[in-house]
């Protein structure tokens, strides 16, 4: 069973940067697509970004040009470099593993990012 563990969240000021990491364990193969979503308590979960093993990326419009997803396929590790952070980026960020059909089959416990204005 795949387990995802996020790290790197914290409190930053608007305009600053933060890098999140996601380490996967328990997978016998390279995870086809890894990604990030976020959720503000009381709101719906929001898609942030994904990246396939061949480097294809997809971003939510709200983070394009500010966030960059990357991954280490050999380690099944994903990263989210967040720059020019805004107060509206404040949320719990979740790492997600997708299968070849883009179905979610694992999600981490989340890491809190708080951006003060």
Image: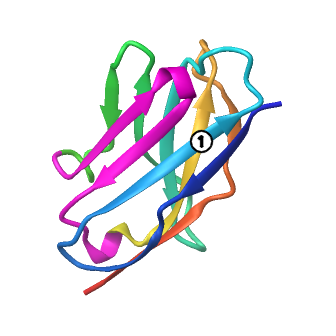
Residue 2 within the magenta-colored segment of the rendering: no
Judged from this view, the residue extending furthest toward the front is 75
Residue 33 falls left or right of residue 56? right
Q: Residue at x 48, y 67 (%)?
A: 9
Q: Secondary structure at mark 1?
A: strand
Judged from this view, the residue extending furthest toward the right is 1
Residue 97 falls left or right of residue 1? left
Residue 58, percent from left and from top: 33, 31
Residue 2, percent from left and from top: 76, 32
Residue 24 falls left or right of residue 71? right
Residue 77 within the magenta-colored segment of the rendering: yes
Q: Is residue 64 above or below residue 101?
A: below
Residue matched to label 1:
23
Q: Residue at x 27, y 53 (%)?
A: 62
- Image quadrant holding the C terminus, namely bottom left
Q: Tell me the quarter of the picture where residue 14 sits.
A: bottom left
- Image quadrant holding the N terminus, namely top right
Residue 90, percent from left and from top: 41, 72
Q: Residue at x 67, y 14 (%)?
A: 29
Instruction: Work out whether residue 32 or residue 28 is closer to the camera in this orientation and state it.
Output: 28
Q: Which range of residues does the magenta coloring cover?
A: 65-88
Q: Residue at x 50, y 57 (%)?
A: 38
Q: Is residue 66 above or below residue 69?
A: below
Q: Is residue 41 above or below residue 7?
A: below
């Amino acid at each position: 069973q795949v387990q995802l563990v996020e790290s790197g969240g914290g409190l930053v000021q608007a305009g600053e940067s933060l890098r999140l990491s996601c380490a996967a364990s328990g997978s016998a193969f390279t995870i086809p697509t890894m990604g990030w979503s976020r959720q503000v308590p009381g709101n719906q979960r929001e898609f942030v970004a994904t990246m396939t093993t061949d480097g294809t990326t997809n971003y939510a419009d709200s983070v394009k040009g500010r966030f960059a997803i990357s991954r280490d396929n050999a380690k099944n590790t994903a990263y989210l470099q967040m720059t020019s952070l805004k107060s509206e980026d404040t949320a719990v960020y979740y790492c997600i593993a997708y299968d070849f059909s883009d179905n979610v089959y694992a999600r981490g416990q989340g890491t809190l990012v708080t951006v003060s204005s």
